């Protein structure tokens, strides 16, 4: 949440900062702003709303080649210009942009107010600027270091002042990287914002402080000791991967990228029909229990992972919300394996849960999309999704890639061939078949876009697909939707069913098919409007369902992938037909880096 951008070099900085913020906007878009030095002063422009509104405010050149910028997802203080970043000290000599939460800001603010510091916003972030002012004596890095020693909580931070041509950057629990160019340096929350300028980055570790000037950088810890193990990484990300191309929205592009993203997940891992290979630097023998952790969509994929691992490997699996895991003093044993699932690799709750597990000497594993992310570096070992950048806030291709990687992981643990091995390389073709149903789904969206409520029902391994389908619709169309196990419908939710209630059934021809048909009949008897995802249009379905989406019949282990894609398209087209901003739904951000 929140995006940070900073630059020092030879280029005019404001256009560069604006373009960087546009690429970071998926991290937060409540307000935005930038700050640059000019004639020994700091000049700032801030705006409530999107970056494009900020861009409209720029009427002249600032003639500056150093600056910091921010796009905000509000935590403390409502979204407005006053609470937008950058924030300043009392005399506007020091400027900061911050991502994270300062947990002790009330105490710090009270202390600073007693020292006659005057605050102008409702944010927790502003205390950092005043703390740095308190300690500033001509050395911005030293003042920042002393300030951060008093801070409890998380931060990704960039600091600028009017008398030193440098940016100070630091992090704790919130992502921040340094981009290394030709006589220029960048600070950013996400490499997507700088990839057109450089593919060389340094990942800052927690409690490290970087000092960046025109032609050099240095990194120290909070004690002032120089860090000598900072490595420059080459990023294999292409500019076209973070552009929409001919698609109206990133979400639609990412839905249609799923044959490719799944093929990338399989490439090099499925050698032939009988062999699955993974490069895992961790002893996975003698595991008595696996605990899968995730938030949101990643939690749904974890529920599917439980089905897959227990069925294939015969190891008991628990699924936990990462946000709840460490607050219940989890009972862990050395024979457990704790697995973090996260698209961004920066999810604050999941990162904290992994740290909790490590403190209890439990093996940790990651299933992550973003290379070099905080969780990827924290876990003992793991595998990458290889799904490519996912810009749309509502996750699509990352979800199906998580399922595929969980399936591969289960087969790797099994170590012997199963019937499903032969089907793995066919998954991209199955997805292509599903994508051909888009026009049918679009017509269904036209019909139901004005409904106020939806119910999604599934059984077995496809119950989490119902949860995910409902989440997608809620996220981007703002229609109330609930996912439920179909068998549980008559234990309460059936009271909601009437002629105004669309009920989406995930009904593959598997062992639960006859049971699902019974549930459909119960809904039909109460005049519910049935939308069914099925493998063929048999006479029973034709009689029961108002609308039908036919997808290929596949093995049970693959069915959640095939069945989730129509639900992604349904949510997308409903939201698009309602004229909503599909890629940037209200109140949401792509990467949840605060608790």
Image (cartoon, rainbow, N blue to C red):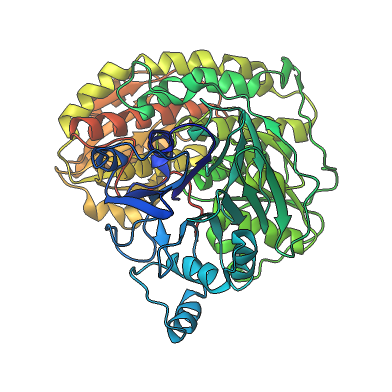
Q: Quadrant of residue 157?
A: bottom right
For the point 33% across and 36% down, which residue is it? 61
Q: Quadrant of residue 185?
A: top right
Give the x, y percent position of residue 45: 31, 50
**Is residue 311 at all visible to an observer of this figure?**
yes
Give the x, y percent position of residue 252: 36, 25
Answer left or right for 379 relative to 403: right
Instruction: Decide: is 354 above or below 117.
Output: above
Pick the front one: 218 or 336: 218
Answer left or right for 198 relative to 274: left
**Is residue 546 at all visible to an observer of this figure?**
no
Instruction: Decide: is 292 above or below 414.
Output: below
Q: Quadrant of residue 590?
A: top left
Answer left or right for 521 relative to 124: left
Give the x, y percent position of residue 533: 36, 28
Give the x, y percent position of residue 198: 58, 28
Which residue reaches farthest bottom? 114
């Amino acid at each position: 949440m929140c995006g940070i951008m900073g630059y020092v070099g030879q280029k005019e900085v404001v256009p560069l900062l604006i373009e960087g913020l546009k690429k970071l906007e998926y991290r937060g878009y409540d307000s935005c702003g930038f700050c640059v030095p000019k004639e020994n002063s700091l000049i700032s422009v801030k705006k409530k709303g999107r970056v494009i509104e900020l861009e409209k405010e720029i009427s002249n050149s600032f003639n500056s080649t150093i600056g910091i910028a921010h796009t905000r997802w509000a935590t403390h203080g409502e979204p407005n210009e006053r609470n937008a970043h950058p924030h300043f000290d009392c005399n506007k000599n020091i400027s900061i942009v911050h991502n994270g939460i300062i947990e002790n800001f009330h105490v710090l603010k009270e202390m600073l107010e007693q020292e006659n510091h005057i605050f102008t916003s409702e944010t927790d972030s502003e205390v950092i600027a005043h703390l740095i002012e308190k300690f500033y004596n001509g050395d911005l890095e030293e003042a920042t270091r002393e300030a951060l020693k008093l801070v409890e909580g998380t931060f990704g931070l960039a600091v600028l002042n009017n008398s030193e041509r440098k940016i100070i950057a630091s992090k704790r629990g919130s992502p921040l990287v340094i981009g290394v160019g030709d006589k220029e340096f960048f600070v950013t929350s996400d490499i997507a914002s700088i990839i057109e300028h450089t593919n060389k980055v340094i990942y800052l570790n927690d409690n490290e402080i970087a000092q960046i000037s025109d032609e050099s950088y240095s990194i120290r810890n909070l004690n002032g000791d120089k860090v000598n193990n900072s490595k420059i990484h080459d990023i294999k990300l292409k500019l076209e991967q973070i552009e929409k191309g001919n698609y109206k929205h990133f979400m639609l592009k990412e839905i249609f990228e799923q044959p490719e993203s799944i093929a990338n997940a399989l490439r090099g891992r499925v050698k032939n029909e009988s062999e699955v290979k993974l490069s895992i630097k961790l002893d996975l023998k003698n595991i008595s229990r696996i605990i899968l952790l995730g938030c949101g969509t990643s939690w749904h994929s974890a529920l599917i992972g439980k089905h897959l691992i227990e069925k294939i490997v015969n190891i008991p699996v628990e699924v936990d919300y990462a946000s709840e895991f460490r607050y219940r003093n989890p009972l862990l044993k050395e024979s457990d394996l704790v697995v973090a699932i996260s698209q961004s690799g920066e999810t604050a709750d999941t990162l904290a849960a992994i740290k909790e597990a490590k403190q209890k000497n439990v093996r940790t594993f990651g299933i992550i999309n973003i290379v070099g992310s905080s969780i990827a570096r924290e876990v003992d070992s793991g595998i990458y999704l290889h799904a490519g950048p996912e810009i749309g806030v509502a996750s699509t291709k990352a979800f199906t890639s998580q399922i595929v990687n969980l399936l591969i992981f289960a087969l790797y643990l099994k170590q012997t061939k199963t019937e499903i091995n032969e089907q793995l390389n066919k998954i991209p073709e199955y997805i292509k078949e599903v994508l051909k149903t888009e026009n049918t789904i679009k017509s269904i969206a036209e019909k139901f876009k004005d409904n106020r409520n939806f119910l999604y029902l599934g059984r077995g391994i496809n119950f989490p697909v119902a949860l995910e389908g409902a989440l997608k619709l809620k996220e981007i169309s703002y229609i109330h939707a609930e996912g439920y196990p179909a068998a549980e419908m008559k234990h309460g939710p059936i009271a909601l069913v009437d002629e105004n209630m669309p009920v989406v059934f995930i009904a593959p021809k598997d062992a639960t098919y006859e049971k699902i048909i019974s549930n459909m009949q119960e809904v039909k008897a109460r005049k519910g409007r049935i939308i069914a995802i099925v493998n063929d249009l048999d006479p029973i379905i034709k009689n029961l369902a108002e609308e039908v989406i036919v997808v290929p019949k596949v093995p049970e282990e693959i069915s959640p992938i095939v069945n989730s894609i129509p639900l992604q398209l349904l949510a997308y087209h409903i939201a698009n037909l309602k004229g909503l901003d599909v890629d940037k739904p209200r109140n949401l951000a792509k990467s949840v880096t605060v608790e």
